[in-house]
Amino acid sequence: MKKSGEIKKMMLILSKATLDNVYACFILANGARMEGIESEIFFTFFGLEAIQKEKLDHLHVATVGNPAMHMPTLLGGLPGMEAVATKMMKSKMEKLDIPPVGEFLEILSASGTKIWACKLAMDMFDLTEKDLIDDLDGVLTVGGFYDRAEGEGTHVIFI
């Protein structure tokens, strides 16, 4: 039995599909599952690209407007910089045995993480469930997401 004040469920909202945001979200969701905590991910706006069959293998690191890159915006905007940064990050993740996005989604789903797409964002980008991964648990409105987040011990994180 869980004690009062314990984390029981992590509800993660992913709004951007840059590699750093996607992996941060997936690692948090996976870590929750490994600790016996429920986890759910709500993909909204550009975060939907992380679960689109045609796009999930082509995500990038953002080099412009990313203060963690520690480079001037002008340099980050040069042709090829995003591709170089993305290649470097993917190489480091591979060395650490971190799975690619598609495989990680399968691992999350198999572990019990619920994967939800935002209805409004899907409508905005003219997407259907056929455009999204097979492991999708469904499409939710914001209200539906909030309904799933109710209860003591639930934490919501926006990424």
Image: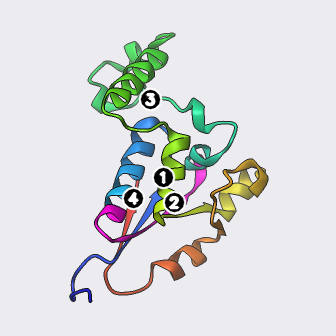
- Disc sitting over residue 110 in the figure: 2
Q: Residue at x 38, y 38 (%)?
A: 98
110, above or below 141, in the image: above
> For the residues carrying marks 2 and 3, which lies nearer the camera in this image?
2
> For the residues carrying marks 1 and 3, which lies nearer the camera in this image?
1
Q: Secondary structure at mark 1?
A: helix
Q: Quadrant of the N terminus?
A: bottom left
Q: Secondary structure at mark 3?
A: loop
Q: Residue at x 28, y 32 (%)?
A: 68
- Disc sitting over residue 9 in the figure: none
Tag 1: amino acid: Ile
Q: Is residue 36 on the magenta stretch?
A: yes
115, above or below 90, in the image: below
Residue of label 3:
61
> For the residues carrying marks 4 and 3, which lies nearer the camera in this image?
4
Sequence-wise, the earlier of marks 4 and 2 is 4
**Image location of residue 156, percent across then percent down:** 38, 69
Residue of label 4:
29
